[in-house]
Amino acid sequence: MPITKKLGFLWSFSLLAAIVGGYYAGEGHWTWAGIVYVFVLIPLLDLVVGKDRNNVDRDAYEQVLHDRYFDALLYLFVYLHYALLLWGSYVLLTDPLTTVQQLLLMMSIGLFAGTIINVAHELGHRSSRIARFHAKFALLSVSYMHFFIEHNRGHHVHVATPADPATSHKNQPLFAFWGQSIVGSYRSAWRIESKLLAKAGHQVWSLLNEMLWFTALPVMLCGLLTAGFSAWAGYVAWVVLVFFLGQSLVAILLLESINYIEHYGIIRREVAPGKYERVNPLHSWNASQFVSNLVLFQLQRHSDHHAYAARPYQVLRHFDESPQLPGGYPLMILLAFLPPLWFRIMNPRLERWQARACQPEEITAIVRQFA
């Protein structure tokens, strides 16, 4: 991997710099800096810099795969988000911001919180206890801990089938998908955990049920933050409670918007009643915009991720044959907020994919290239 790209992953911290740096540069008035950075500057940078279709060379693959530098970035991200929660609570309590400025700051921090779910997603696919602990610790900070169960054991099993609540349907608006995915994924996590407990001979309503902990721990964290800052301020710090819940909500909606984009309309071929072809890199939308991929730890190379879930972000591959989005995730999220425009742009692309998916011989030949 070129040293420029290796160091380029430090760009993932740029959103944090935009939020905190923008706030102080604007003397407390630029609370919208994170929002502008994500939805204006990054799409412009994607347009100017272009795409990155390069993959790690076979000769360098093992070295890049085991380079601890890439893991260190992920772990650091988790702790920086907790620091950002403390900083945001302090600022909201002590600085004379208007209600609009407070809401914009909460939204900006919520966007960074959304990238924390991405980090948790990456770490949650690792086998080490340290990585999996940090995945749960990250999800705790955004009140979405059940994602740890449902994503690996639910979404990756049922993706691109009617059984997956995180797979969006053709002509389904983003706002309808939010309800489907948020409610459906939580229910799915409960079903998965209940089956695992029953298989091990344990009761569902016991301390061994992770879903009980995953539901209670965010409430406890929110209470701890509110109580701590209330004791420090000398009065009930309701703004801290609203802030924690608000940044969690923005993070969750950002994640689900990305799920909508990644899997819009793509359904695997049913090879027998209730059974579907194996997931391959043709079953997720891919995006190779260079800058947004650096910011998102190459999450946009989603096609390779779903085909080979254990592959770390630094060695994920681009394939021209995968269905390609016309822009990076920040731009596509903006388009998804305008359903008629989204359908106009994406439905023709989806229909071309569907026509291609009806030719299994061609698909088989393509998939062999990915192995």
Image: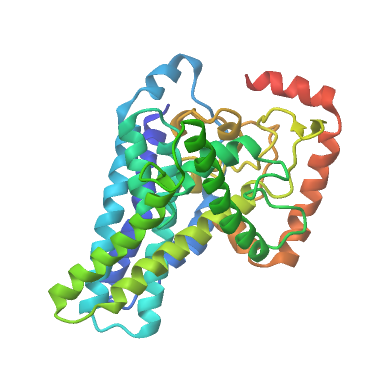
List x then y, in percent, for residue 140.
Answer: 36, 53
Near-viewer residue (234 or 116): 234
Residue 234 seen: yes
Q: Quadrant of residue 306?
A: top right
Residue 43, placed above or below residue 158: below
List x then y, in percent, for residue 85.
Answer: 28, 62
Residue 278, placed above or below residue 93: above
Q: Residue at x 77, y 47 (%)?
A: 349
Q: Residue at x 56, y 55 (%)?
A: 256
Q: Quadrant of residue 83?
A: bottom left
Q: Residue at x 49, y 59 (%)?
A: 252
Q: Quadrant of the C terminus?
A: top right
Badge count: 0
List x then y, in percent, for residue 265.
Answer: 74, 48
Q: Quadrant of the N terminus?
A: top left
| Residue at the outermost top position | 59
Residue 177, placed above or below residue 292: below
Near-viewer residue (345 or 104): 104
The answer to whether residue 174 is left or right of residue 311 is right
The answer to whether residue 68 is left or right of residue 317 is left
List x then y, in percent, for residue 10.
Answer: 34, 43
* Colour setting: rainbow
Residue 110, placed above or below residue 149: below
Near-viewer residue (233 or 200): 200
Residue 301 seen: no
The answer to whether residue 270 is left or right of residue 263 is right
